[in-house]
Image: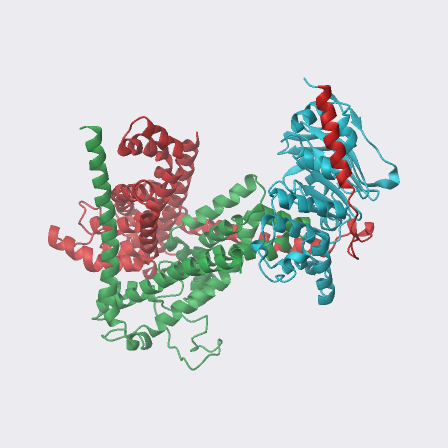
Chain colours: A green, B red, C cyan
Amino acid sequence: MNAKRSDKLATIIIYIFVAIVVLILAGILGNILITGVPHLSWHFLTSEASSYQAGGGVRDQLFNSIYLLILTTIISFPIALGSAIYLSEYAKDNWVTSLIRTTIEILSSLPSIVVGLFGYLLFVVQFGFGFSIISGALALTFFNLPILTSNIEQAISGVPEQQREAGLALGLSNWKTIRGIVLPAALPGILTGLILSAGRIFGEAAALIYTAGQSGSTVNYTDWNPFSPTSPLNVMRPAETLAVHIWKVNTEGIISDATIVSAATSALLVIVVIIFNLGARYLGNKLYQKLTAAK
Amino acid sequence: MNKKTDDLKQVVDQAIAEQKVPHVKLNKLGPTSVDIERLTQPSKETRQEYWGKGLTYCAIGLIIILVVSIIGFVGAHGLSTFFTDHVNVFHFLFSTDWDPSDGKNHVGAAAMIVTSFSVTLLSALVATPFAIAVALFMTEYTSKKGANFLQSVMELLVGIPSVVYGFLGLTIIVPVIRNLFGGTGFGILSATLVLFVMVLPTITSLTVDALKAVPKQFRQASAALGATHWQTIYKVVLRVATPRILTAVIFGMARAFGEALAVQMVIGNAVLMPYNLISPSATLTSQLTSQMGNTVMGTLPNNALWSLALLLLIMSLVFNFLVRLVGKKGQK
Amino acid sequence: MENLKPSYIKTFEKDDIALEAKDLSVLYGGTVQKLFDASLQFKRNTITALIGASGSGKSTFLRSLNRMNDKVATVNGEIIFHDLNVNKNNINVYELRKNIGMVFQKPNPFPKSIRENITYALKAHGQTNKKELDKIVEESLRAAALWDEVKDTLDKSALALSGGQQQRLCIARALAVQPEILLLDEPASALDPVSTSKLEDTLKQLRSKYTMIMVTHNMQQASRISDYTAFFHLGHVIEYNTTAEIFTNPKGELTEDYIQGSFG
């Protein structure tokens, strides 16, 4: 076969492969949205899940997912930010640092089911938290930390060295320079990383099934005292999220409309994740422009 | 020479003469008298630095403690199968007899190990050509617009939660395979197809990085020698990028190996040695997912599950190590 | 092997010295030595130019003077400031840098407003009186010859300024902290000729109050604005004298070659 023909053939094959990948995504999205969205009614979003008959909603699951997302972000953001600052600003270039980096890489490559089981062992069993929102939020924090840390670190390292020198030369401490100059400049990147990680948290299930649990408790939405057992804000109650709900209705298969419920829930999850993705990009760009462009 | 020195002298004299501009009076602003004492005393900045640095040390310390305790806890529980319950390690690794509630001679994880490796290798095998094709398309064939479009496609594929993949596998792939090949439809083939889509974006985006890292001169040099576009790609770009593409594939495999729910939903969950691609079986992760809630802490069946978790953990360390190894080789 | 022995090093009366480096050596990564036993005295209220080819160690030397090299290199030797060796571990580098300011090669304003660029450090150092801050903003911008150009746009982003304006803002920012000594690392290298000449005028005026040490690649610039000049070669100080002497009557062969070559 001559060179020209193989060149043409290769091009054709590559185009076909790319087309297949695009079609797969289109098929997946189309399938989820077409089967799911028609069932995404107000009723579905605001009524309780049913444990054995058709017609249940995902009100509690939706609330739990959002609540867990917020708690996890609150817990993991400061730790990730601190670690990222350490890695980009304070870590010396030596074996200790490379050991620390290896540690973080290991954490990020651990299967989320293993992280979830560790959370189960430590919080649910050892600390006696039981299946609870707090156990789930902590497990999700572990799952979230390595990627959030490295996203933030990248954002911080992207700030030019001259900015740090400028601060230091004015007699500012490293810390003040980081907080007042480097972090604001890195804000677009940090926010993008945070929102993308929110998408991951929102869809995660494996780390939750043995920490936040696979069932919900009775929740009374008029009771906002976090210490009351029926309050939605109580962190000690078991809480099933949207993602776990999909898994459960499909593996247990008790309710008759499992497929419809899963399709609608999947559509909900995917829509939220898409919103997060677009939001991250939009906000990142917008902030970046605001920081750099002349007003 | 002498002339030149004279010229120079003239230039310099002129320059120095120009220096004598009248000094504009600066107002109050000027150096304050230096307080020498303060140069040797800690100041507000010193304290800021102390606390700030301390905070970041705490944060990184927390992560390290976390990783160490994950390894420690999972290790301790996973090893108790062998030390407390006296299960033979070789029996665990090579026997297919999995029924831990029947005692220590029935703790053989070989079927799950084989299934886990099968789905991992197969999905990577299917995904890699697609990933390379997409990555080549993004870096060598299309404009920035096309690359951005595919980038978004990949980001969306990453963003879709794994339970959604599992659900789609359950409702689309499993029935299709059942109709095509008979049987239940559950099994390695279904899991492979689901994992293929899940690892595709991982391998693709890392392959794109690998291809982008190939210096432009190589491409230009090859093109200048009269090579066709494909010859340049095949003989130069891909060759140079091979170690990093390999790293990308290993990352993809690590993701496939550790994926739990999506696989658990389509694999069939029967702890049997898979004798073909469409017979129900179980992976390490799927067994953990479906059985952990059914065992009692501290008993042999529970410990045996922790041994599976330990195996997963060890494999993720191995993948990590492999990435480093290939990375080092690539640098040489 | 070239003779790297100093051919002439000027010294001053003790009372005239604002800053002195004694046997300053700089090592990068513990092995690569960039500066060998540099000893220089800097006279109060003068501009001293540090000249030499790339890699001659002049920038390294300058950055060591206010301990900006601490993070990346080991600096041995003494830096005497008001009879105190400030190259020691017990020295509060933040206080030191308030007294020895620095302006860099590339303009590096913060991504904040013009006003905040100047007030940020002051606020951090405890100055909170708004009237006082406004006064300092105006005076430092006047001192840097930027006031007339920006007085109506103080709350606009500093990044909207031209390169030359940004660099003068950086000088204003450094002056606002009220240092005694100003270190300038090729401050005009990124600027166009018009901005450069404005910047040079600014520096010439500042001489009445500040001691300035400036690294420059540009011989004309050194002769235009400096009182004293030190010539660096391969990490060694070769010659240090008044600018006029260095340029017209260099004592060392290396200095002569460099000056001849640079003026061409």
**In the drawing, does residue A238 fall left or right of residue C204?**
left
Q: Please give the name of the residue rendered at 44% of the width and 62% of the height, measured from the top-left corner.
A: A125
Q: Quadrant of the C terminus of chain B?
A: top left
**In the drawing, does residue A72 fall left or right of residue B137?**
right
Q: Nearer the viewer, residue A96 or B157?
A: B157
Q: Residue A23: x, y in percent?
A: 22, 53
Relative vertical location of residue C244 with respect to residue B137 in this rendering, above or below = above
Q: For the view shown, which residue lies furthest in the bottom direction?
A: A222
**Is residue B174 at all visible to an observer of this figure?**
yes
Label total for image: 0
Relative vertical location of residue B249 with respect to residue A232 in this rendering, above or below = above
Q: Quadrant of the N terminus of chain B?
A: top right
Q: Nearer the viewer, residue B32 or A171?
A: B32
Q: Residue A191: x, y in percent?
A: 47, 59
**Is residue C238 at all visible to an observer of this figure?**
no
Kindly indicate the quadrant of the structure image that contains residue B298.
bottom left
Q: Residue C41: x, y in percent?
A: 80, 36
Q: For the view shown, which residue lies furthest in the top direction?
A: C1
Relative vertical location of residue A262 with respect to residue B17 in this rendering, above or below = below
Q: Residue C209: x, y in percent?
A: 80, 49
Q: Nearer the viewer, residue C205 or C209?
A: C205
Q: Nearer the viewer, residue B286 or C78?
A: C78
**In the drawing, does residue A24 fall left or right of residue C34?**
left
